[in-house]
Image (cartoon, helix red, strand yellow):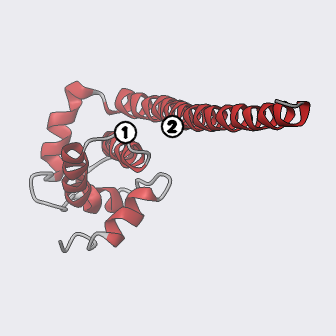
Amino acid sequence: MNWDAIGAIAELLGSIVVLATLGYLAVQVRHSRNLLEENRKFALSQVYQARSDTRRQSAMHLSDSTYLAELLGRVGQGVEGELDLDKLSEEDIVRLRAYYANIYFHQENNLYQHQIGLLDERTYQLTGEAIRYFMPYWTKLNVYGTGSIEEWYESNGGGGA
């Protein structure tokens, strides 16, 4: 065998090693990209959850649970979508708004968790049912957040479904 043949075989082997290395690196890059995406989702979820928890805790603090049952009874919460705010003082309205805001923020968080793939379908369905039920109350009390609930509500039949 001459030196030209040995050089050609060495170049061929070198090319094969380079291709194998590139294949290995491609697999590693894809795996790293997937891990980064999952970490990004988790980080976003934690930030959103912390924000939502803070808002909900503030709202629940205002609603004073010992007073809540009597307050809901006075406004007729049992009749779907009907709230008689004329029977309430400004303080009662603030408490009621805080109570409904707590529910709103929880449902808003559920929509976000579903959007990034971290909420199961059953919980998502229950979230939809809750949004349809509570939307008239939120509207009457001017409870709102990022707009995601209103967008979901409109795109899912506006309560007519």
Q: Secondary structure at mark 1?
A: loop
Query: Where in the figure is residue 39, as x and y percent of width and height?
Result: 54, 30
> Residue at position x 35%, y 30% from top?
60
Q: Is residue 94 visible?
A: no
Query: Where in the figure is residue 126, as x and y percent of width and height?
Result: 19, 48
The residue tagged 1 is 118
Q: Residue furthest front?
A: 1
**Mark identifier at residue 20:** none
The residue tagged 2 is 41
Q: Residues within 10 Å of mark 2 (few under 14, many from 20)?
A: some
Are the residues at dot 2 and dot 1 in contact (C-beta closer than 8 Å)?
A: yes
- Which kind of residue does numbered mark 1 sit on? Leu
Query: Where in the figure is residue 72, as x and y percent of width and height?
Result: 18, 43
For residue 110, which quarter of the picture? top left
Q: Residues within 10 Å of mark 1 (few under 14, many from 20)?
A: some
Q: Residue furthest left?
A: 78
> Residue at position x 10%, y 58% from top?
79
For residue 58, which quarter of the picture? top left
Q: Residue furthest right?
A: 3
- Name the quarter where the C terminus is drawn: bottom left
Q: Is residue 131 visible?
A: yes
The reply, left or right, for residue 68 in relation to residue 8 is left
